[in-house]
Amino acid sequence: QVTLRESGPALVKPTQTLTLTCTFSGFSLSTSGMCVSWIRQPPGKALEWLALIDWDDDKYYSTSLKTRLTISKDTSKNQVVLTMTNMDPVDTATYYCARGGGLDAFDIWGQGTMVTVSS
Amino acid sequence: QSALTQPASVSGSPGQSITISCTGTSSDVGGYNYVSWYQQHPGKAPKLMIYDVSNRPSGVSNRFSGSKSGNTASLTISGLQAEDEADYYCSSYTSSSTLNVFGTGTKVTVL
């Protein structure tokens, strides 16, 4: 059974750096073709793709957020980490990690973690 | 990279069929057969309903079907049921530097 779970702070202050961790099971990111994406959804708004890391450690970012995002993986821990710098209230959203992205659909999603940016 | 365009809302009565459109460009929807559809109930994570334009994952009802013509993809729900009331999002691979793009989302209401 494939599962993903996001973890991280529920509240961050403006200008701070957000670090989110996606811990997964049921698959390995060292398997050829496998990838994990981060996606966010502001309250009442649409989904927005943020970043992807694949089995070969290739990384892809949303053009509009590229300068603020870093994605990395720890294959031994089955974890993918996303950092977002210079947080702003408009970054308030539920952040999801999901298996897939690129040419592949997002077939399994985590439950999401709500992050509020406020002083 | 702009979001794909979906109607804000679509409604239908139980048993009817409805279709949700998803319009992009030749750089995304029109250029590749990598369109997927997601169902999201309030407070829940999205669920994959259709991938690669018209394929259903195991366990998804055959009342859901997908198609594509030019730069527009479509999701059809036949035999509409109360449990189908949810938000629906399309997504596509894109040749722009942003790898994936989502649609603006459609709220489906069962009357």
Image (tube, rainbow, N blue to C red):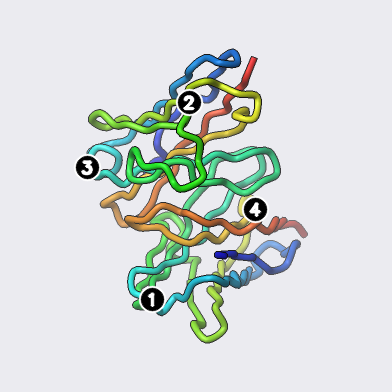
- Chain for numbered disc 2: B
Residue at which label 1 appears:
A31
- Disc marking residue B18: none
Which element type, helix, strand or loop, lies under badge 3? loop
Relative to residue B1, is residue B105 depicted above or below? above
N-terminal-most mark, 2 or 3: 3
Which element type, helix, strand or loop, lies under badge 4? strand
- Disc marking residue A94: 4
- Chain for numbered disc 1: A
- Disc marking residue B77: 2
- Which callout, 1 or 3, points to the residue nearer the camera? 1
* Amino acid on which disc 3 is placed: Gly
Q: Is residue B33 left or right of residue A39?
A: left
**Is the residue marked by circle 1 packed among few (<14), some (14-19), or many (20+) residues within 10 Å?**
few
Residue at which label 3 appears:
B31
Identified at 39% across, 56% down, the residue is: A63
Q: Position of residue A92 (x, y in %)?
A: 66, 52
Cα–Cα gap, marks 1 and 2: 35 Å
Q: Quadrant of residue B110?
A: top right
- Quarter in which the C terminus of chain A is drawn: bottom right
Cα–Cα gap, marks 1 and 3: 28 Å
Please tell me if label 1 and label 2 are on a single chain: no
Identified at 38% across, 45% down, the residue is: B51
Please tell me if label 2 and label 3 are on a single chain: yes
* Amino acid on which disc 4 is placed: Thr
**Is the residue marked by circle 4 packed among few (<14), some (14-19), or many (20+) residues within 10 Å?**
many
Is mark 4 in CB contact (under 8 Å) with mark 2? no
